[in-house]
Amino acid sequence: MKKPLVKVDVLDASSEKSKNNSRRKFIKLGGLGIAGTSFLLYGCSEEEFNPGGSPDMPDPTPDPDPGMEVFDLGSGDVGILNYAYALEQLEAAFYTQVRAGAYYAGAPQEEKDLFDDLYNHEVIHRDFFKAAITSVAGEENTLPDLEFDVSSIDFDSRDSVLATAMALEDTGVGAYNGAGDRIADATYLTLAGKIVSVEARHASAIRSLINPDSADFAGDDIVNPENGLDVAYDPSEVFDIAGDFIVTEFTANNLPEPMTGA
Amino acid sequence: MSIIKLLDEFSSEKLTTKSSSRREMFNTLGSFGKKAAAAAVPFGLATSGKAKAATAAFFQENSAVDALQLALTLEYLEAEFYIKALESGVLTAGRAETVYMQISKHESAHVDFLRAGLEGAGATPVDSPTFDFTAGGAFDPFNDNGIGQETAYAQLLALAQAFEDTGVRAYKGQAGNLMGTAFLEPALQIHSVEARHASEIRRIRGLEGWITGSMRGDGMPEATQAVYDGEENVMQGGVNVTGLNFADPIVGDVTEAVTQAFDEPMSAETATAIASLFIVSDE
């Protein structure tokens, strides 16, 4: 498993320049040509992978390309929307690749149908967020199209695909659950609610496929058996998991804190 | 107990002289009990002026405590349903029984969690209503009245689907009332568990785990349609999602896919109306 490339450093040193250069950066990143039509497998040399980096530590080489500033997700509700948009981009990219893989090609129709649906839903979520954030905050404040590295996933293997799908869906559920208390506008809270329950339906279905006739759809590993509560993750926990797949660097330095300190 | 009788009970002055548990419920919830009169028509077609007035009074409160009391009432319904289902002998060993055991564990935990939360906030949790899962004789999910194991089993699954899909929508509808409180996050954590449950129950019934349009799905009684009305919505945040220029092609029907991709909230009024179909007054 490769080291995460997404930098969620808590230093605010980079936020100023990222704000000032956000427009230029968007154009540059947009120029990478990852318009979502295909999955771009990212090849790079070992030193570019920042093996010493971790979400808790400032990147020792924070600016490999001086001309390309790092996008910050932003603050307030826009920051949370961009945060969700990043996850939806990852999920959509993953399912796009699943449907191009050998497992899917040889899967029973029922499983193909399921992955078609999951692909549809995540593409819809992704493109909805793009439209919504662009409309609310402008293109310059909308997370660019991200580049992902999914080379750690064996798309020929049912086990590998299902295990990754489970991890992504469970992470999505936890991310939305943990973000709810950071949202200021009730409309966005409800929107997040409309999406998170669909992610939970996905997670349940994938878990049920992995282990049919079991309690895993809402297993004790993910739903606390003592109080019946699902997972809720902070952004740093989410990036610990999802960061493995995200190539495009961005920062999350200004995301709102939980309103109730939960 | 018939639905008409339920209406009479709830809409008459007698409600204030009922047993202590019911009186306490009404006292704690204000007009919540009266609002249950909205359930007089199966699954939420309340039209009486009285019910509307009571509902309006309820929503003026609109507090986090009201939201939690509604959630607790729904959890009582689910918790008792699964316990009785497991005791009924209708479920034979296998997937459904395993699933019901896991769900039962969660729903009972939700009851305890919400009661403790309300008490911690200085509120008195509502007592559990008395439930009638036959809905006045319309169903026989536990085979108590001899409808037969096969039909009872089908009804047991259909009711579970209706309860879980209702729970998802009801919690979603209350999220706004919990904003800025310590209850929002745990309520969301329960909300997604209900969605996990709903997906599995639907899949056991041979459906997809998600809701297409406002379709209740094969084998669901028409009386459950109120659980699904409104799920056909395609407007999200002022955007008609079906009109987006998707960067990757949608497989199959776009409108169907869009409605699947977003679950819709349900008002407290509708959730109460649905739950009240299975609530009887104490005699």
Image (tube, coloured by chain):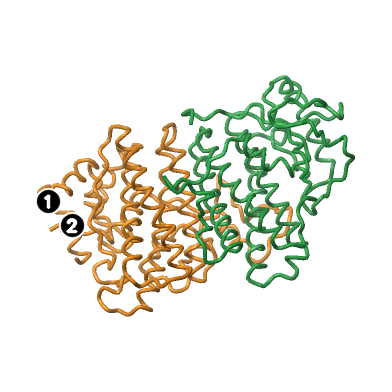
Q: Is residue B74 left or right of residue B216?
A: left
Q: Say which quarter of the image contains residue B84.
A: bottom left
| Dot 1: chain letter | B
User: What residue did someone put label 1 on?
Assistant: B18
Q: Is residue A91 left or right of residue B7?
A: right
Q: Amino acid at mark 1?
A: Lys
Which chain corresponds to the colour green?
A: A
2 and 1 marks in contact (CB < 8 Å): yes
User: Measured from the top left, where is residue B216 in percent x and y?
Assistant: 45, 66
Tell me what residue is drawn at x 67 percent, y 67 percent.
Answer: A112
User: What residue did someone put label 2 on?
Assistant: B281
User: Measured from the top left, where is residue A17 in percent x and y?
Assistant: 76, 22
Assess disc 1: are there few (<14), some (14-19) or many (≥20) residues with their C-alpha within 10 Å of its C-alpha: some
| Dot 2: chain letter | B
Task: Give the alpha-carbon distance from disc 2 to disc 1, as whole Å.
Answer: 8 Å
Q: Is residue A67 left or right of residue B97?
A: right
Task: Find chain B in the image and tell me its colour.
Answer: orange
Name the secondary structure under disc 1. Answer: loop
Q: Residue furthest front?
A: B93
Tell me what residue is drawn at x 61 percent, y 34 percent.
Answer: A78
- Quadrant location of the C terminus of chain B? bottom left
